[in-house]
Amino acid sequence: MATTDAQIGWATETPPGTEATVTDFLPRRSNGTRFTRQTNHIDDDSFNAGRRMMDRAQRARAATTYSGTIASYLYDRGMLELFRAMFGTLVTTGTGPYAHTFTPGPLADDLLTVQLGNPYSGSGVAPFTYVGTIASAWQLDIT
């Protein structure tokens, strides 16, 4: 059951990788959702001027990734940017009503700033913002 405090919002990043301001929010079906953080490292056992840099391999930070599942209902507003990020290509025709056609395409430039609003013990919402997210997998269920 969704509450007004459990919400999700997204906005397309322009240019990709730059945080976008999220202004539209929709209710979520799951409360307390947070993404799991994984920081990847690169092991570096290189030499400098013929000597070893450290006794053990150095660890350099690489990309940090977040993963998780978000469940929401399908709404008649606010879904356009999300579907474009899921499919990759959007063609809009018409002058009202509009017809939107989504087809599979490259996702490299379809990054979103996603903001999850989780309820907390006080009143209000605790926001969690994730920049540079990509819809790498998704599922649409009709019940």
Image: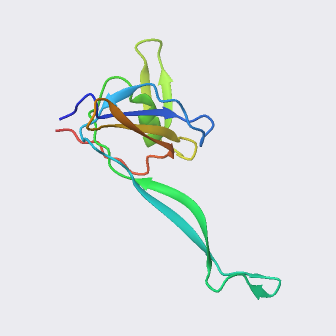
**Residue extending furthest toward the right:** 49
Nearer to the camera, 25 or 120: 120
Measuring 66% from the left and 81% from the top, which residue is drawn there? 45
Q: Position of residue 66 (x, y in %)?
A: 44, 54
| Above or below: residue 91 compared with residue 64 | above
Q: Is 107 situated left or right of 57 in this image?
A: left
| Above or below: residue 48 compared with residue 123 | below
Q: Which image quarter holds the N terminus?
A: top left
**Residue extending furthest toward the top:** 96
Q: Position of residue 28 (x, y in %)?
A: 28, 35
Could you say which quadrant of the image residue 143 lies in?
top left
Nearer to the camera, 88 or 52: 52
Measuring 44% from the left and 39% from the top, which residue is drawn there? 114
| Above or below: residue 2 compared with residue 38 | above
Residue 38 appears anywhere in the view: yes
Could you say which quadrant of the image residue 10 lies in?
top left
Measuring 47% from the left and 29% from the top, which residue is drawn there? 22
Measuring 28% from the left and 29% from the top, which residue is drawn there? 123
Residue 88 appears anywhere in the view: no
